Image (tube, rainbow, N blue to C red):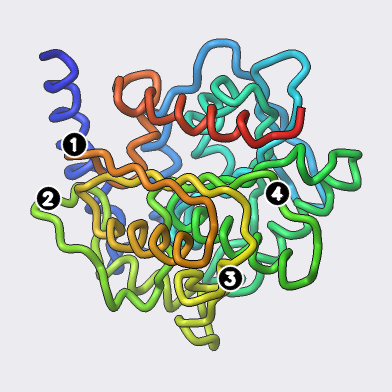
Amino acid sequence: MLQHLLESALRQTMNRLVRPVLNPTVPVPLQRRIVRQAYRSSIPPKGAKFEATTVGGIPVTRTSFSIKPPGAVLYLHGGGYIIGSSSTHRGITGHLAKTSNCSIVTPDYRLAPEFPFPAALDDAEACWNGLLEQGLKPEQIAVAGDSAGGGLAVALAMRLRDKQQPLPASLTVFSPWVDLTQEQLYEPECEPVLQPSWTSKAAKLYAGKESLSNPLISPVFGDLSGLPPLLIQVGSQEILLNDAERLAEAANRQDVEARLEIYNSLWHVFQVHSGQLDRATKAMETAGEHIKRHLAG
């Protein structure tokens, strides 16, 4: 009963405080400031440690929970490619560090509209290469991300494969945004976080002069063959449900080991409530197990 009430309260909070900010009429700099404050409600677990540093020339936050992590997770934060940072995602990365036993490296990749595509992808690749230069093997690195960061994680794996570079051990994506054309958005009865008008504007700001159907912008249109094992988590109350389902279908069709988990009555990137909401905590534990299972020992 208490968890049901908490879910309802969190849903209302997102709908009243976050959704109105994610509006195309709100200036992007103001969105960034407000979201930075709003994400303070996403609380990392006790014992999580955060270090500001650089990897591959990219500013990152390194999150750790265990003393000797067996590997690393390159975590790409969400925010429609226009907002968000490693600081806003400390709750998620803290809990993922705990459940995966890994060091979580979250780059502050360049954002649109100041830096449109392919800036974010270039920065993600530079950070990947930086982890390799630090001595980690590809099979000791997983890649994960939420929302736009989920799409970016898949795009990074595609680019590495196309360059015939070693691939990460696994991919984990929360509410991935993988079709920026928005031609097949889901229409839930309740969507407490995202507005199609906001994601539409963010997509155009990120793509710049590139086509929205470019596979490195909208990975669902690309060749997914050869990608590492993929875990997809999504809520039923979000416009990106179809994105997640289509990504899973395309991956399975192309012989990628992919698992889709749909969490009924939960919303976009509900994992931010790990440590508060039992189902979010359980989802994060599942994500951690996926990463550990595929990481080289």
Q: Nearer the viewer, mark 2 or mark 3?
A: 2
Residue at horizontal 91 percent and vertical 39 percent from the top: 135
- Specify few, some or many for label 4: CA neighbours under 10 Å numbering under 14, 14-19, or 20 or more: many
Q: Seen in the image, is 102 located left or right of residue 70? A: left
Q: Is residue 248 above or below residue 107?
A: below
Q: Residue 46 at what x, y percent from top left?
A: 53, 11
- Looking at the rendered structure, which numbered label has been put on residue 135? none
Task: For the N terminus, give its image quadrant.
Answer: top left
Q: Nearer the viewer, mark 2 or mark 4?
A: 4
Check disc 1 and give the amino acid type: Arg
Q: Which badge, 1 or 2, is on the more N-terminal residue?
A: 1
Cα separation between marks 1 and 2: 10 Å
- Specify few, some or many for label 1: CA neighbours under 10 Å numbering under 14, 14-19, or 20 or more: many
- Looking at the rendered structure, which numbered label has been put on residue 11? 1
Q: Which badge, 4 or 3, is on the more N-terminal residue?
A: 3
Residue at horizontal 64 percent and vertical 73 percent from the top: 118
Residue at horizontal 61 percent and vertical 31 percent from the top: 293
Residue that label 2 marks: 190
Cα separation between marks 2 and 3: 32 Å
- Looking at the rendered structure, which numbered label has been put on residue 168? 4
**Disc 1 and disc 2 in contact, CB within 8 angstroms:** yes
Q: Is residue 57 above or below residue 277?
A: below
Q: Residue 103 at what x, y percent from top left?
A: 70, 29
Check disc 3 and give the amino acid type: Glu
Check disc 2 and give the amino acid type: Cys
Cα separation between marks 2 and 4: 35 Å
Residue that label 3 marks: 114
Q: Nearer the viewer, mark 1 or mark 4?
A: 4
Front residue of 41/176: it is 176
Task: For the C terminus, give its image quadrant.
Answer: top right
Q: Is residue 256 above or below residue 268?
A: below
